[in-house]
Image (cartoon, rainbow, N blue to C red):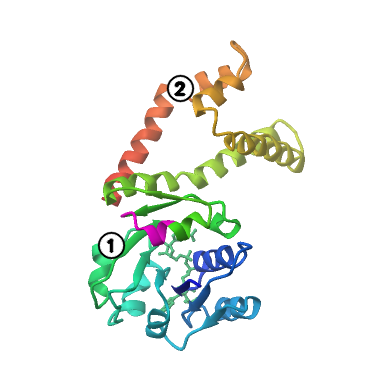
Amino acid sequence: MQRIGVIGVGEIGRALVEGLCEGGGEAPEVFLSPRGARTAAELAGRYASVRVCADNQAVVDSSQIVLIAVRRDQRHEALSGLRVGGDRIVVNVMAGVRNETLRATLDGDFPVVRAIPLPTVRERRSVTVTCPSHPVVDDLFEQLGGALPVPDEAAFDVFSALTGTLTAHYSYLATLTAWAGRQGVPPSEAERYVRSLFQGVGRSLGDEARALQQLAADHETPGGNNERIRTTWFDAANADALGKALDGLLADLG
Ligand SMILES: NC(=O)C1=CN([C@@H]2O[C@H](COP(=O)(O)OP(=O)(O)OC[C@H]3O[C@@H](n4cnc5c(N)ncnc54)[C@H](OP(=O)(O)O)[C@@H]3O)[C@@H](O)[C@H]2O)C=CC1
């Protein structure tokens, strides 16, 4: 049975535990840090294989894989002075913290793997980028929807930048809904319709046999409405502005 520790039982820590414990197979043993006490107690109450440790050192001592899921600015308080044996694997899910930076905060010589789990690990539907590849860690994320190992942190940063585009997507949908509202459509109807349209997009994306450009072409009639909006609004200048925003983000991540 796997033994997995989680230091930082907040939003993403909880999603990871839920995904691991509800997979259908044998649930791993999970050791939680005491902070985030309410969530930790709730998870320990819900799953027989989850327990809350007395302190963060006890999490490390009990686990083969230790997931570090505190916020970046909480890491010194959470981690300074913790001793980590060479037979442990540390998984760094903190945004903006390089593996070497994390290693310097902890005491020991052990493998560190950086990862970007998304909240959909809860349903085992997140493809998680990892760096560097480690068979044990990649296998863990395979259980949660898939692992996508990348060779270095420069490549990792590119994927991190992509995760920064999610809320713009929701805002785009909200903007469409607001526009329909200004045309006199009741907001609830506009929102219902926009959600339905884009849930269809989500389902199409599951069809990995078709490339993204092909999906776009398949949804577009030559000279039709979709082509008109794509070429008049999402034109070269707009695509370039998006590329520049991502360039800026990537430069700041590096
Ligand atoms: N949310 C997301 O979708 C994703 C988040 N991440 C990364 O994961 C990390 C956590 O994010 P998120 O879950 O959103 O943040 P939260 O604030 O929800 O969770 C942080 C948790 O860390 C706990 N904590 C604080 N100090 C300590 C300590 N000294 N020892 C142990 N635990 C401590 C907090 O406990 P308390 O409540 O008691 O303060 C809280 O439960 C961040 O670094 C973020 O970049 C990565 C991928 C996705």
Image check: 232 left or right of 115? right
Element type at mark 1: helix
Q: Are marks 2 and 1 in contact (CB under 8 Å)?
A: no
Mark 2 or mark 1, earlier in chain: 1
| Mark 2 or mark 1, whichever is nearer to me | 1
Q: Quadrant of residue 172?
A: top right
Residue pointed to by mark 2: 235
User: Which residues are drawn in magenta?
Assistant: 132-138
Task: Identify the element where label 2 is drawn.
Answer: loop
Query: Is residue 36 shown left or right of residue 113?
Result: right
Measuring from the top left, give residue 133's x and y in whole percent.
34, 54
Q: Would residue 134 be counted in the magenta stretch?
A: yes
Crowding at mark 2 (Cα within 10 Å: few <14, some 14-19, many 20+): few
Q: Is residue 7 visible?
A: no
Q: Which residue is mark 1?
A: 99
- Percent of width and height locating residue 221: 62, 14
